[in-house]
Amino acid sequence: MLRLLLRAGGIVLLCGFCLVLPPLLLSNLSSGQSSGESVASSWEETPPPDNSLSNSYTMTELASPLPYRAVWISYLEWQHTDFSFSQAFEEDISQMLEQCADAGLTVVIAQVRPFGDALYLSELFPYSHLCTGTQGQDPGFDPLAILVEQAHLHGLELEAWVNPYRLQNSGIPASLSDTSLAVSHPDWVKQVDGGLWLDPSREEVQAYIAEGVRELCDNYAIDGIHFDDYFYPTTDASFDSAEYESYCAGGGLLSLDDWRRENVSSLVARCYEVAHDCGVRFGISPQGNLQNNLTAQYSDVTRWLSEPGFADYLMPQIYWGLDWQSGNDTASAFDCCLAEWLALPRAEGVALYAGLGAYRIGDGDGSASSMEEWNSGHALTEQVNCLLQEGIPGFALYRYDSLFENNDWPSLAKQEVDTLKDLIQDFAE
């Protein structure tokens, strides 16, 4: 087995193993101070938290009690999952979760509300078309209830992944239920390039989405709520020109861009508060390109990192390899992009993780110089090693099929999984 040791500030880090470290140890890592103990002993004996947030919970209390090594299971995986009856679904899910656990992963981020519809019994959203082929049709069982139960039986945590605004995109779903918000509340909806999206500026929309988070937290023993990078669907000023004009007429002074960022931040703060009221952690995986978040998605990630009250963790999707290059430009290379995020101020209790692009295996990331990297069988492991050098305590892999059901590059995908698994097992021994 491969064993790599990296030293930072006198603390030994065994690469390939990500820990949800207590705040004191995280501050020691970032400042170069030594705790006088190994990372392993810090994991085994976590001291009581001393970083109070604005409510009764702290990041340490809400953080995963297991090392945070996650995988995303998206609606694309649900498209080939058997929803015909509960036992068939449970068998499919059990096999998927067994593979995740066997690979040394500890958290599953499952997409449960992809298009304003639900893979669970909801009073607010129709059943997803992914369950039966028809949005709003009851599959006869509750997929999320089975997901949560099976995840915990396999020693995994389950985070419920929610797309807050998207109702329909690129013709998915093909038809909408009468209980879709696009039908029941058309005044809440905006159309962009044939897709339908909830209006982020509307108070009713923000309240409804937050109530949806509460429904999930109240009804299921989930371990987290997760948002991805889908916020504003366009930069076109006409998207919400009437709403912005009304805001300005009422005395509002923010620019259009700042107003949009405030709308998203208001929603994020509401959902964070609801999740914390229920004792559930709340995390976001924004785009890896920092500027795109601020100016294209209007997600104020710099604020969410630097101020408490928005997220327990941010996990930027850094989906480029260490060798990425375009001409002389290396700005999007994994280590360069990570350094940009690391340079941002972080509030106590807000963790920084990283999303890794497993879907790049065999296909590359658009850089001719990095094809060898993505055909090496250990690209993801090298990126995890980079995270450990920087004291980043968690990661997630996008996505399940790219690792465990990769029909295009099965051998490479297996090498990637096995390399990560070996490193994790080596640490455990």
Image (cartoon, grey):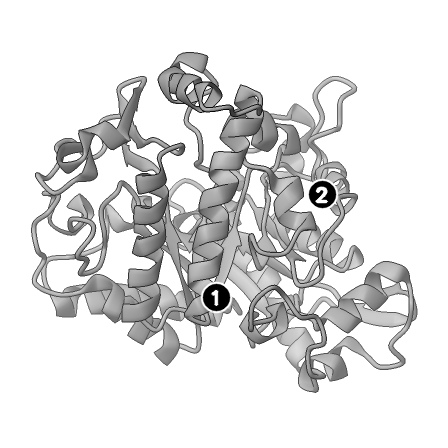
The answer to whether any part of residue 83 appears in the image is yes
Residue 50 place in picture, x, y as percent: 72, 76
Residue 198 place in picture, x, y as percent: 31, 33
Q: Please state which of the two labelled residues, at mark 2 or mark 1, is closer to the viewer.
A: 1
- Which amino acid does the dot numbered 2 rest on? Trp
Q: Name the residue under label 2.
A: 341
Instruction: Give how far apart the Cα atoms at labels 2 and 1 are.
Output: 25 Å
| 329 horizontally vs 404: left or right | right
Q: Name the residue under label 1.
A: 276
- Which amino acid does the dot numbered 1 rest on? His
| Residue 237, placed above or below residue 399 | above
- Write down the quadrant of residue 407 in the picture: top left
| Residue 9, placed above or below residue 122 | below
Residue 13 place in picture, x, y as percent: 79, 68
- Front position in the image: 371 or 84: 84
The answer to whether any part of residue 5 appears in the image is no
**Which residue is located at x 45 percent, y 52 percent?**
270
| 108 horizontally vs 129: left or right | right
User: Label 1's element?
Assistant: helix
- The image shows a total of numbered marks equal to 2
**Which residue is located at x 52 percent, y 55 percent?**
283
Residue 318 place in picture, x, y as percent: 61, 41
Whichever of callouts 2 and 1 sits on the residue coming sooner in the sequence is: 1
- Front position in the image: 50 or 156: 50
* Quarter of the image where the N terminus is located: bottom right
